[in-house]
Image (cartoon, rainbow, N blue to C red):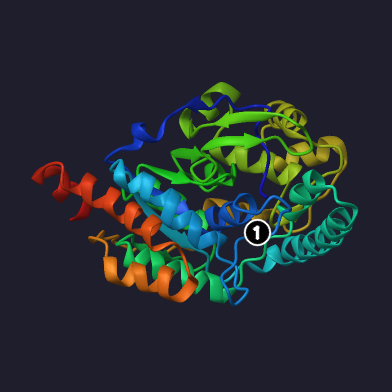
Amino acid sequence: MGIDLSALVAPRPRSLEDFAGKVLAVDAYNALYQFLAIIRQPDGTPLMDDRGRVTSHLSGIIYRLTNYLALGVRPVFVFDGRPPRLKARTLVGRSRRRERAVREWERAVEAGDLAAARTKAMQTSRLNQEMVGQARALLDALGVPCVQAPSEGEAQAAWMAAHGLAYAAGSQDYDSLLFGAPVLVKNLALTGRRKLPGKPLYVDVHPEEIRLDEVLGALGVTREQLVDMGILMGTDFNEGVPGIGPKRSLALLKKNGTLAAALADIGAQIEGAEEVRRLFLEPEVDAAVQPVWRAPDRDRVLSLLVDEHQFSRDRVLAALDKLGSAAGKSAQRSLDLWS
C-alpha cells in the first residue's frame, strides 16, 4: 500500500481531459489491482468467463482505458520485475490479509449481507501471472506500450517521468514521490461514482495531480528528508517506528534534519534504514526504454475478448469504434496519438 501522506498533501483536482496529449507512466500492477477490486458483481464476486477465469482486469482495460485513449491520453503500463529482498515481509503480510478477507467475505455472503460482502471481496483480489499475461496481450493488441521494470514498477514509472519520457507517474501510492516522480496522478483507475467502504454513501472520484516540488516546498523538506519521513512511518521495505505518523515524522525531520538524528532523538532504531534509502533514491531501473504507440489491432482485440473470454462483441466494437473516431478527427491528431 505504500506510505500515506494524505494528511500533509493537497492534490490538485483534474479531469482526464487535462492529460490529453500527455504520456502517463502507469504502475500496471497498481492499476490492475484497482480494476480487480472495483469491477465486481453486487455480492463481490469478480467478473468471470464461462470457464471461471476472472476477467475484471480485462474489462477495466477495454472499457476504461479506451476512454483515456479516445481523449488522447497516452498511457504506458509499467510492470513489476523481481521484488527487492526487503519487500518479502510486506508480500507475506498482503497474502495473509487477503486470506483473512476471503474468510470474512464468505461469512458475509452466507449471512446475506451483500454490502459487507462486496467490501470484503474488494480486499481479496489476487493477480497471478496468467492474468498479467492476459493484460499485457490486450494492451499490446490495443497498441499501448508495456515496459518491464527490472524491479519496482513504481520506481521505473517515476524514473520515466523524471527523465522526460512521461509527464507523470500514475499510481494510487504516494511512494511515487519518494521514488522521485516530479508529478503523480492518482485515481486514473477509480474515476467515476464510488461507494464509500462500509457506508451507504457515494462520492464522485476524479483524477488528482500532486507535484513533488510543491509538496517539498509546502512541507519545507528535501526529497531525501521525505524518504526519511517514509522510513520513520514504515514503507513496503521496512517496519516503521510505532506511533510515528505523517505529522510526527515531519516534525522529527524538521527538528533534527536527518533520519539518524531523528532516531537518536526518540531512542529508536530501524534495521536496514540505509538500504531502504538507496531503494528509493537509487532504484534499479531500465534506462533504455523507448515507448512506442500503435494503432489497435481490432481483430486481435476481438479474438482475445470475444472469442476467448465471451465479452459482448457489440460492446467491444463500440469501444474500438470510439478509438477510431478519436484517431480520425484530424490527420495531425492521428499522428500525435498513434505514431
- Residue 87: image quadrant is bottom right
Give the residue number, with chain letter if any, for mark 1.
Answer: 275
User: Whole-percent x and y of residue 121?
Assistant: 74, 55
In the displayed structure, 46 sits above or below 120; it is below
Q: Is residue 206 above or below residue 44?
A: above
Describe residue 71's horizontal placement relative to residue 83 as left or right.
left
The image shows residue 182, relative to residue 11, as above or below, that is: below
Q: Quadrant of the C terminus?
A: bottom left
Is 254 placed left or right of 21 in the picture?
Answer: right
**SS assignment at label 1:** helix
Number of marks present in the image shown: 1
Q: Residue at x 55, y 65 (%)?
A: 55
Task: Give the residue displayed 71% in from the left and 29% down from the top.
Answer: 201
| Residue 283 in sight here | no
Residue 116 percent location from the top left of the image: 81, 46
Judge by depth and name the residue closer to the eye, 258 or 311: 311
- Residue 124, position in %: x, y? 73, 59
* Name of the residue lying farthest toward the left: 331
Q: Is residue 119 visible?
A: yes
| Residue sitting at x 74%, y 28% | 247
- Residue 291 left/right relative to 246: left
Give me the residue at 44% from left, 62% from top.
312
Q: What residue type is disc 1 on?
A: Glu
Q: Quadrant of residue 32?
A: bottom right
- Quick one: which residue is furthest to the top in this view? 218
Does residue 298 appear left or right of residue 183 in this picture?
Answer: left
| x, y percent for residue 249 | 74, 33
Q: How packed is label 1: few (under 14 Cα within 10 Å), some, or many (20 or more)?
A: some
